[in-house]
Amino acid sequence: MMQKVVLTGDRPSGKLHLGHYVGSLLNRIQLQAEETYQSYVMIADTQALTDNFERPEKITESVFDIMRDYLAVGIDPERTTIFIQSQVPELAELTVYYLNFVTLSRLERNPTVKTELAQKGFETSIPVGFLCYPVSQTADITAFKTELVPVGEDQLPLIEQSNEIVRRFNRTYNTDILKEATPLVSKTGRLVGIDGRAKASKSLNNAIFLSDSPEDIRTKVFAMFTDPNHVRVSDPGRVEGNVVFTYLDAFHTDFEEVAALKARYQHGGLGDTAIKEILNATLQTLLEPIRERRQTFTHKELCDILQTSTHAARRVAQQTLEEVRNTIGLRYFD
């Protein structure tokens, strides 16, 4: 039976948080359990350097933090190929070839890129490496003949641009060696940060991390935005935009209980402290075993797994690169 290739990845710029957990990690665990899929997970250190090149140690140290998070939540290296982007040089060569199939203006129009450029303050001084990361992502996707790419809705323009490059390459050389990828959008969507003003993010420091201590979790839960007009317990409260209820929807296992809590809160008679205590207990139960598993892996074990898995990924990328070279005509010696 032919397996469909699934590729996902994370930028190693810090430890993973609950937004990653509901937005991608749970999906990866489910996909790796299904025999119809062959899963690849990329630690995108080359991409992370595009806006962290002056602090490379932040990236290199985070590679192993992320690897701990992967193993702790249940990503199995026996069923998922986990590799480091920079250690597969074929991806860089594919990127160079694909740069010929996209214009500067098209890259600048990409909605995801525009949003991230604004967030990072790059409007007047744009690093070329950052601007061109959709092309690098195309190399990542096509190198493994990826068919499915799990993404959040904000990442859909990147998949669209990748497929544009694939189509133009195939038309130019009258071939079909490159395959378009289909986005697999997470049902959960983006998890809002504890401040309620933006998505949970490492850079915005508004996230609960998978490795947070029990004390950190409790502190962050009790700092969550609720309803500013819900001054007294007896006051009716708003559920919409209330971060505590957003997190209860995402992580509490008893949906009927959450529905009952919402009804009580909206009617009046349920305080913010009470619902935060419930959320704190929910997250402590979820994160305690993950935090404990993180601590069981030695640095050598992480290195051995990454090296073996990255070598396996490189063999696949080498085959695709050879096909691309031959298609373009870059073959001079027998």
Image: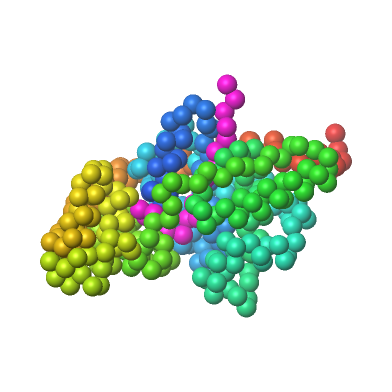
Q: Is residue 18 above or below residue 40?
A: below
Q: Residue at x 59, y 25 (%)?
A: 2
Residue 40 x, y percent position in the rendering: 53, 39
In front: 196, or 77? 196
**Count of picture labels:** 0
Q: Quadrant of the N terminus?
A: top right
Is residue 325 left or right of 3 when viewed as pictured?
Answer: right
* Quarter location, residue 125: bottom right
In the rendered image, residue 251 lying in the magenta stretch gets the answer: no
Residue farthest top in this picture: 1
Residue farthest front in this picture: 267
In front: 115, or 215? 115
In the rendered image, residue 15 lying in the magenta stretch gets the answer: yes
Q: Which residues, given as a range, are shown in magenta?
A: 1-19
Is residue 13 left or right of 167 when viewed as pictured?
Answer: left
Q: Residue at x 39, y 56 (%)?
A: 191
* Quarter location, residue 181: top right
Residue 126 x, y percent position in the rendering: 63, 72
Whether residue 227 is visible here, answered yes or no, is yes
In front: 160, or 16? 160
